[in-house]
Image (tube, rainbow, N blue to C red):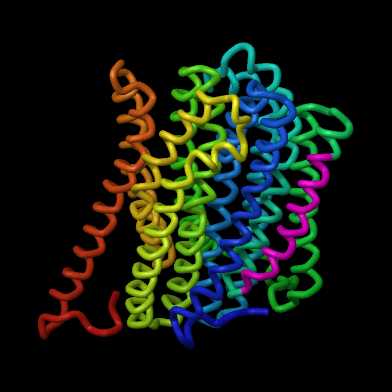
Amino acid sequence: MTQDLTIGNITRKILLFALPLMFGNVLQQFYNLVDTLIVGRFLGADALAAVGASYTLMTFLTSILLGLCIGSSAYFAIQFGRDDADRLKTGIFLSFLLIGLTAVLLNIFVFAGVDWIIKVLQVPEKIWPSMREYLVYVFGGIFAVFLYNYFANLLRAIGNSLVPLLFLGVSVVLNVVLDTLFVVVFHWGIMGAAVATVISQYISGIGLFIYCFVKCRELRPTKAHMRWDGQILHSIFQLSFLTCLQQSVMNFGILMVQGLVNSFGETVMAAFAVAVKIDTIAYMPVQDFGNAFSTFVAQNYGAGKRERIWQGIKKSVQGVIAFCVVISSFVCVFARDLMKLFVDKNSGAVIDVGVSYLRIEAVFYLGIGILFLLYGYYRAIEKPGMSLVLTICSLGTRVLLAYTLSAVPSIGVTGIWASIPIGWLLADAVGIGYYILIRAYRMSDDPHGRASRDKV
């Protein structure tokens, strides 16, 4: 099942494609969110802090694979828009080998360096044993993350965002059941939460691989496509590597912030562990809308429909503004209630810190909503380097300000929270400014002094 985004009503097409992405990414967050809920309720604050710190680390590690998969997806979408089946299938073969090998090497590295990684993160000594136990088991799911994200992004590139959602839904239900069974019934502790997550990840990854192999014959490379093609590999590598670098820089910056958060002790660690997940789920829909927008742009870019891209930009910005106003209001009003869903009501200090974080971030969700559109746009028009520049602006500002402001006694940990939206807004200014400049440049190239309708 494919969906051609180069024809039809723009708003309807983008929304229908984006909705399964939104639901799917919310479901994917439940892998760690369920761990957080059960661990926080049944294993205590120290175990909760360990899982929270592990979540940030795993997000950084898997972002390497996710970036490669997203970059490859942009290449797939462009070839699908051009109706070039041969280049598409050869690209599938080469990218699968490239990213699969990367997943294996990454897995070897993290298993070998787990103690060094925990030390770099400045994890308090009392949290160390729990975090190490959790990581040793959860690292086993890295290859499953590759399988799911590779085939999910392949299907999304050709307009199929529903099937990845269905497989993920089954996996999440299984994760909830296994988490409850292993932690609450079998009393396996933090190890049980990790094992439940890994088993569920492999169910979705292997299941999606089998689906693509059996049902999507039009995507299956033949012997003729299993060859070295330097030009295709270069195109894939350029998109994938820069997108991977963008994702890695983004999450490395977050990891550095996590290290700073850890230095404020167990209460702040536990609050951040919960609040950052609520925060992520709150703005996740605009991230997925940005990914849907990126596929829309890539298919139309491949088909040469520049005016349709411009119309898509205007409608997408309007949609992001409307959503961010609603979700920002909701999180600001219900921040305390949201924290109480995951933290015992007697842990007042943890709840207070988490509420402070959520209200500061929520006011500026529009900033990250626009930023996700910019990331998707520049990736889709084969300018992933610009997405990397925006990430460096956002994360560089965040890290620099977080360490500077938090060192001021009167500001403290609030400085870490404030640095995040400041980084978003700076990156937005750079991305929009660059877009205005390239449109002005194209306008100046027109002999009549105006931009032609097919330019974006």
Across and down, in percent, residue 88 comes to 60, 72
Per the rendered image, the range of residues in magenta is: 160-180
Can residue 176 be found in the magenta stretch? yes
Across and down, in percent, residue 298 comes to 46, 71
Q: Is residue 420 left or right of residue 251?
A: left
336 vs 315: above or below:
above
Q: In which quadrant of the rendered view does residue 401 lie?
A: top left
Across and down, in percent, residue 322 comes to 38, 65
Q: In which quadrant of the rendered view does residue 70 lie?
A: bottom right
* Quadrant occupied by the N terminus: bottom right
Q: Main secondary structure of the magenta part?
A: helix
Q: Does residue 131 show up? A: no
In the rendered image, the residue lying farthest to the right is 186
Across and down, in percent, residue 229 comes to 58, 64
Image label count: 0
Seen at 17% across and 69% down, the residue is 441
Seen at 33% across and 46% down, the residue is 424
Seen at 46% across and 25% down, the residue is 261
